Image (cartoon, coloured by chain):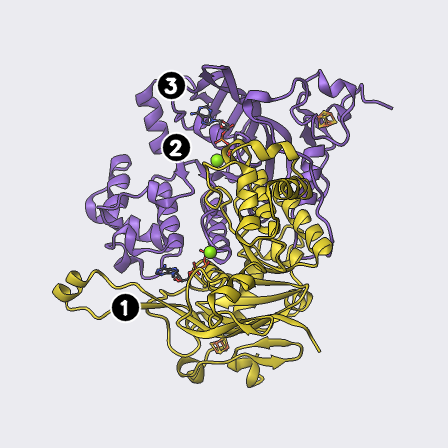
Chain colours: A yellow, B purple
Amino acid sequence: MTDVLVGIENLSRDFDVSKPWLNRVLENEEKKYVTAVNDVSFEIRRGETFALVGESGSGKSTIAKLIVGLIRPTGGQILFDGTNVATRGSASMRQLRSRFQMIFQDPFASLNPRWRVKDIIAEPLRTFGVAEGRAAWEKRVDELLETVGLSAKDGAKYPHEFSGGQRQRVAIARALSAQPEFIVCDEPTSALDVSVQAQILNLMRDLQDEFGLTYLFISHDLSVVRHMASRIGVLYLGRLVEVAEGKTLFRDPKHPYTKMLLDAVPDLEMTGRKRQPVEGEIPNPIDPPSGCTYHPRCRLANDRCRSEVPVLKLHGDTKAACFALEEGRS
Amino acid sequence: MSDALLSVRDLVVEFPTRKGILTAVDRVSFDISRGEVLGVVGESGAGKSMTGSAIIGLIEPPGHIAGGTISIAGQRIDNLPYEAMRRVRGKRIGMVFQDPLTSLNPIYTIAEQLIETIRTHMDLNERQARDRAIGLLDQVGIPAASRRIDDYPHQFSGGMRQRVVIALALCVEPELIIADEPTTALDVSVQSQIIDVLKRMCADHGTAIMLITHDMGVIAEAADRVVVMYAGRVAEIGAVRDVIKDAKHPYTKGLMGAIPTLMQDSDRLTQIPGTMPRLTDIPPGCAFSKRCPEAFDRCFVEQPDCRPYQGRDVACLLYDEGKPQ
Ligand SMILES: Nc1ncnc2c1ncn2[C@@H]1O[C@H](COP(=O)(O)OP(=O)(O)OP(=O)(O)O)[C@@H](O)[C@H]1O
Ligand SMILES: Nc1ncnc2c1ncn2[C@@H]1O[C@H](COP(=O)(O)OP(=O)(O)O)[C@@H](O)[C@H]1O
Ligand code: SF4
Ligand code: SF4
Ligand SMILES: [Mg+2]
Ligand SMILES: [Mg+2]
């Protein structure tokens, strides 16, 4: 039996992107919605790194925000350790909330510029009552700073006194401070230079080993995902199109979109492989194609693809949502 | 005399500040031949964009070129008066930046912008210019170009806009295109399309491209040779394959180990300790000395020159005669 920590079930989220009411009336337009996340289900196992990859606008950040409760779902549910996150009363919800944390792409925007770093790191400690009394939390903050590779005296500084990589270390220390089990990391290294990215990725792996953390790791960079993830979900226009073990996904991608995406990654090994030129573009999410939303770009599309929506099904060890796979045409 | 199209020699760019003079580009030299893609790679603040701005004569004052020469086909362009330089930019050097919206005017259609640029620099009538514009859009991969040409920039996606900017840069058949992070804001699938377009321009028109990026993958995919920059200086220059597969400079080696790849299974990435120094505190001697795992006593006092070594140029005292035993 696998030990599921986070269960995502049929999760959906629509955003209203209509023009203001008056314009709509004058121009005689209907309300418009974007379905940023569309019927997404997956499980995150205790102690693993589950990665979500997808191109801009595919719904990665929206899923992250739904899971940590920054926005509410339009449909579906999120189970944390078996408990529905949305239905719990506020006191037990607070308890539950202390067990997960989030790290964002832009470490500057997520740290209050007017607070000293030690107060930033201590905030979750105090909110969730993890450390009682000033002496206790100050000691804990010093430990945390050292855990993430900074020094205790950095606590007296303000965020702007740090480089991008150091700020991300502060954000990680803050996320760790309430001793969470689960951390949602939304593009944690996308704003960093590669040498600094390597430092942060190594740190995140060490912390995972040390504290038995579970990560949801979100990135648009397939090489980074390859390095970090045990399992990977691929998103296209708000839908999960493939879920597989990391190694399997890269060795034997199943879904036509995953194949295209892997083929588009620059070949740093310079193997001289022949690439298929990328066809078309991601369509406008306000008016997505019918059926399988990938059909206008897919070489294998047929009439069924244009009218029916494929769902995730097992193909070997991989789950993928594609009729060509189901029909043995791929 | 070299037969290079662009030749940059000992370029120095300085910024006077209250704290003293900052050297953003420090004695940088390289050549680009016709039809060649020269990659310029390095971390943010390494001086890549500043080098590009110096070549097109657009460094913002009080920054200025404080030394060295820049020549295009043997003619110096670093000391031209403003008007003459403007003509060089319009006619001989095209530019593509990271954010396509900085190069496109939101209130004019794509057709108006392309036609105006073409007619400013070429003796064509409206009809001929429009045909040429449609041809260019077609070449950079805009589907239904003859219809889409009358759209406004906001009606295009990010990738399409970048194609339009490339078309705009190609209008006057420049000999050199300087592309500064042209794919950085784009998704990988769109990036791969844009790289294909740039490579085709080189092959079909013999255009030389200076491709500035922080992404070694883009260099591997698109460039013929690469300049690795660190703290305003050149660390290593060589054929892309040599530099990527067999880096010599300790910084390049560290950088290559720090990049996760799709192929290899490694638990840890190589870590270069610390970060690139700010211009205000570049150490004496080699700029990389404080972070270099191979540093020895001379590195802290002597600034290494870029010297030929095994088919490339490296600025590292390890490859100098006086290296330690
Ligand atoms: N607050 C909002 N209001 C309206 N639309 C939104 C909102 N947030 C997200 N969207 C839309 O939802 C879709 C998914 O967005 P999301 O930010 O989750 O994408 P992402 O995968 O994180 O992309 P990126 O790689 O660019 O960060 C997009 O079409 C986006 O425009
Ligand atoms: N207006 C300016 N005044 C002072 N320093 C500047 C100015 N513009 C850029 N610099 C400095 O010049 C260096 C090189 O910058 P740049 O060429 O933009 O780097 P890159 O493109 O490699 O990221 C940086 O350290 C930057 O801080
Ligand atoms: S369902 Fe059809 S259109 Fe969609 S990916 Fe599979 S073959 Fe292509
Ligand atoms: S000169 Fe010295 S410090 Fe600089 S890269 Fe070479 S070995 Fe390292
Ligand atoms: Mg996002
Ligand atoms: Mg730059």
Measured in 3D between alpha carbons, the distance from the residue under mark 3 to the one under mark 1, in whole angstroms, is: 55 Å
- Please report, as a chain letter, where disc 2 is located: B
Q: Is residue B148 visible?
A: yes
Task: Name which quarter of the figure residue B146 lies in.
Answer: bottom left
Answer with left or right where residue A239 lies relative to residue B27: left
Residue marked by disc 2:
B92
Question: Of helix, strand and loop, which one carries label 1?
Answer: loop
Q: Quadrant of the N terminus of chain A?
A: bottom right
Q: Nearer the viewer, residue A40 or A161?
A: A161
Asked if marks 2 and 1 touch (Cβ < 8 Å), the reply is no
Amino acid type assigned to the residue bearing label 1 in the image: Lys
Q: Point out residue A233 in the picture as x, y percentages from the top left corner.
A: 57, 67
Farthest residue in the front direction?
Answer: A133
Query: Which mark is in front, 3 or 1?
Result: 1
Residue marked by disc 1:
A32
Amino acid type assigned to the residue bearing label 3 in the image: Leu
